[in-house]
Image (tube, rainbow, N blue to C red):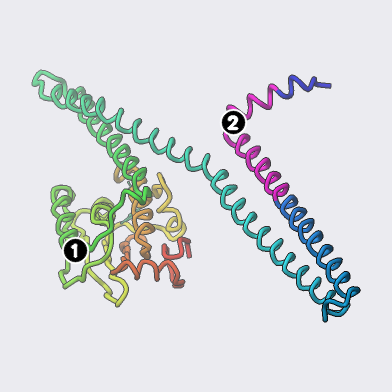
Amino acid sequence: MRPWREWGIDSYLKYKTDIFFSTRVKIIFFHTLSVIVIVLVTIGLLEYVQRAILSGVVESLKNIAAGTTSTTGIGIFEKVDEEIRLTQFLVYVSVMIVSVLVGFIATRLALNPVRDSLIVQRRFIASVAHELRTPLAILKTQNEVAKLDADMTSFVGETLGQNVEEIDHITEILNNLLLFNRVDTLESIVFDTVNLETIIETVIARLKTLAEKKGIVITFERTVIPHVYGNATGLEQMLFNLIKNGVNYTPRGGEVIIRCTSITEREVTLRVSDNGIGIAESELPHIFEPFYRTDSVQEISSGTGLGLALVFEIVKLHSGKMRVESTMGVGTQFDVSIPRKPQDMIANQRSHEVGVGYDFSQQKNL
Ligand code: ADP
């Protein structure tokens, strides 16, 4: 049998190093303590009331015997019954108060390690991504400078060009990881009234060069779009990712169209559609998963598989809704609905709409 001393040292070390073990111990300890408190309070109250009742009864009986009171024997029992009820009530109330307090502290204790590890994980991702970006930028510049050498063979020139492309790809993954990392730190995200028309124009201007290079026309079918309530940077990133995908996955000569398809009291719906390669029905449920890329695009373009995952998080953050429809070889359309006012966000969180696609107001895949 293992000596107790050794077991004690092992447990102590585990308590000091394993945060989940120490939390379990703390919660068990705390819970036991609360049960002891409840039992002591109950015993104390019962003891006190028992004494009070007894002395009351004795006093009343003495008075009855001496004939100095009009109270009868039945009157004494009624009084005792009343006091017992009062004690029961006090015991229930104190048990409830202690239980609520214990529940509150136990939840905090249980969630602390989860919250702390999330913070550590987020900081770790952010610092790794930041650390990697600088050497990548230097590598890219060196490759681009080397490419300027006129004496270089075409093979070396091609290799350097491919290096630059790969560096751009890794940088894009890092940028997306950084954005992804930041997206659900709600406290740091400011919500305000947002003009979607301005945002759409900005995004189109940012993607103009890429679209021209790929021979794609981006059209914004302008109508008056009411302001929505959201985070401008997040919504710009969301539209950027959707429109960029349209450009990337549409063959030369194709078109990406952005239009507002519905304006209701509560929300504005934008549609980003293209006449590109489309997405197979079996792959639709997966495209919002981080790093997921459909089979058909692996050779067409070197994406990161993080763009739509980020769109997913941004729409969720806005308590918005999202639907996607696609036909292989015909095209794809993404509908995004964003609430117009803060109260609409809350209403969306409560409502349950059934439809095809993704309804983030319920945070589930329908
Ligand atoms: P990526 O960086 O690969 O574009 P995304 O997360 O933006 O990553 O998209 C995930 C996958 O969904 C893409 O790789 C592609 O297979 C598919 N996809 C997204 N948008 C479209 C679109 N408009 N047309 C066809 N396929 C698309």
Q: Quadrant of residue 256?
A: bottom left
- Which residue is at 80% across, 20% downward? 3
| Residue depicted at 10% across the width and 24% down the height | 148
Prevalent SS, magenta region? helix
Foreground: 248 or 84? 84
Q: Is residue 81 above or below residue 14?
A: below
For the residues carrying marks 2 and 1, which lies nearer the camera in this image? 2
| Alpha carbons under labels 2 and 1: distance apart | 49 Å
- What kind of residue is marked 1? Asn
SS for callout 1:
loop
Q: Which mark is residue 18?
A: 2
Q: Is mark 2 within 8 Å of ligand 1?
A: no
- Image location of residue 18, percent across then percent down: 59, 31
Q: Residues within 10 Å of mark 2 (few under 14, many from 20)?
A: few
In the picture of the structure, the residue carrying the numbered disc 1 is 195
Packing grade of label 1 (10 A; few <14, some 14-19, many >=20) is: some
Instruction: Give the farthest residue toward the right.
Output: 65
* Quarter of the figure with the N terminus: top right
Q: Is residue 205 left or right of residue 172?
A: left
Q: Which of the 4 quarters of the picture holds residue 135?
A: top left
- Residue 325 seen in the figure: no
Residue 52 lies left or right of residue 148; in this view the side is right
Q: Is residue 20 magenta?
A: yes
Q: Does residue 200 show up?
A: yes
Q: Residue at x 40, y 44 (%)?
A: 291
Q: Identify the secondary structure beneath mark 2.
A: loop
Q: Position of residue 265 (x, y in %)?
A: 30, 77
Kind of residue at badge 2 = Asp
Q: In the visual, does 77 lie left or right of 83?
A: right
Observer-nearest of 173 and 108? 108
Q: Is residue 334 located in the magenta-colored stretch of the structure? A: no
Tell me which segment is drawn in magenta: 9-37
